[in-house]
Image: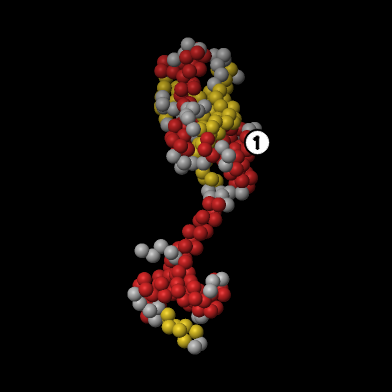
Amino acid sequence: MLKDFSKLGTFLTVVKERSFSKASKKLGISQPAVTQQIKWLEDYIDGKIVERKKNGITLTKTGEELYKVALRLDKCVSSVEKEIIHIMNKELTFIVGSSFTIGNYVLPSFLNDIKDAISNDVLIQVDISKNVLSALIDKKVDLAIIESPIFLDGIIYREWLEDEFVLFSNTPFPKVVKPEMLKYYSWICREEESHTRKVISEAFEDANLECNAFDIATTVTSPTAVVQTVLKAPKEGKQTVGIISKYSINDELESSKLYATKIKGLEFKRSFYLAYLKERKHDAFIDKVVNFFMRKRKI
């Protein structure tokens, strides 16, 4: 099997220069070395490929066929070399895996700034925190940004932003709602397996409240679905509410499409974390991205 492509490179140079002597000068090797490499190719394919003439060289029919193959191979090698250079120069798309609230509502506000700061293309992949961490371990993402994390071996966690959940609706609230009033609302909730639902349930349990005792109208699987369901709920009759990250509804609060309040005596807070593999802790590219995010702790 032909594994040494340098001989084909020599052959291409001989054809381009139309001379063994000119090819040797171009390649920086002796003319006998050029002759030897062409002879090796001829022995390998068992056929003559070059005819020497007084005014240069000509290709035999076999040589013309080999020339076509060598050109295709040269293009492939050049393409691979460019990809390797991209890797060496870190000219790759930097992939950030994030949980739903972060990916859909937090990161878009400064995505262009990230690209400018690290001089690199950035791709955001959104999923639940558990799957994002799995992707990080499998090296399918470079950096994970998740809600209060599942701590796993081999991963470095950096606390990033503080998040707060608020009670919200598409109709106005009192400034503060008493816990005993919660049973009178129609609730749009996240699924029980979600981290959001767990944080809310734990806060309610501390106040001796039970989520399942509320009037749960619908259970959905993303913060976007919670927001959209509340937005489109009837404004007459029982008030429809949900609990969501403050980041998820900033625009709707400013435009008065939604209204938010706090529940007396209850706080729903969590932290967002940056996570990356310990084996990349000395990776200058990871450091550059993490440092950018740490400078952007106030958004």
Q: Is residue 79 above or below residue 239?
A: below
Disc 1: which residue: 295
Which residue is drawn at the image coordinates 45% and 84% (left, top)? 52
SS for dot 1? helix
> Residue 35: image x %, image y %?
46, 76
Up-down relation of residue 147 to residue 56 (above or below) = above
Quarter of the rendering containing residue 299:
top right
At x 38%, y 79%, the residue is 48
Horizontal and vertical percent for residue 216? 41, 22
The residue lying furthest to the left in this view is: 46
The N terminus, quarter of image: bottom left
In the depicted view, which residue is nearer to us: 255 or 22? 22
Q: Quadrant of residue 245?
A: top right
The spot of residue 168 in percent (x, y) is: 53, 25
> Quick one: 170 or 208, which is closer to the camera?
208
**Label 1 neighbourhood size at 10 Å, few (<14), some (14-19), many (20+)?**
few
- Residue 283 horizontal/vertical position (percent): 57, 42
Identity of the amino acid at label 1?
Answer: Arg
- Whether residue 54 is visible: yes
Q: Tell which of 155 and 186 is nearer to you.
A: 155
Towards the viewer: 153 or 250: 153
Q: Is residue 98 above or below residue 19?
A: above
